[in-house]
């Protein structure tokens, strides 16, 4: 995973957490749900990138 991808995914996660916080503070369920979905999507992307990295590590170890 490139550093740019890591930063992009982390920024997306933080934006989602901000939406959650604002949604909770203003009692806006829709905004909270959007933030929750954004956090989940960012974490899923991060997990996918970690799997790719692990695959590359295994490939390199076997070479």
Image (tube, rainbow, N blue to C red):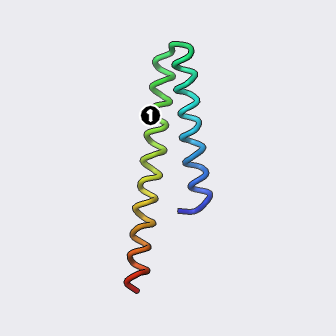
Is disc 1 surrounded by few (<14), some (14 to 19) or many (20+) residues within 10 Å? some
Quadrant of the image containing the C terminus: bottom left
Q: How many marks?
A: 1
In the picture as drawn, the residue positioned furthest to the bottom comes out as 63
Q: Who's the residue at 55% across and 48% down the image?
A: 9
State whether residue 9 is above or below residue 26: below
In the picture as drawn, the residue positioned furthest to the top comes out as 27
Where is residue 32? Give x, y as percent. 49, 23
State whether residue 2 is above or below residue 19: below
Q: For mark 1, what is the residue?
A: 37
Where is residue 2? Give x, y as percent. 57, 62
Q: Who's the residue at 43% across and 72% down the image?
A: 56
* Element assignment for label 1: helix
State whether residue 29 is above or below residue 10: above
Q: Who's the residue at 57% across and 54% down the image?
A: 6
Q: Who's the residue at 61% across and 51% down the image?
A: 7
């Amino acid at each position: 995973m490139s550093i740019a991808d890591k930063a992009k995914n982390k920024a997306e996660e933080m934006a989602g957490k901000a939406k959650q916080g604002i949604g909770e503070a203003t009692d806006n369920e829709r905004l909270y749900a959007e933030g929750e979905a954004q956090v989940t999507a960012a974490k899923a992307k991060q997990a996918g990138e970690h799997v790719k990295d692990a695959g590359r590590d295994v490939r390199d170890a076997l070479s």
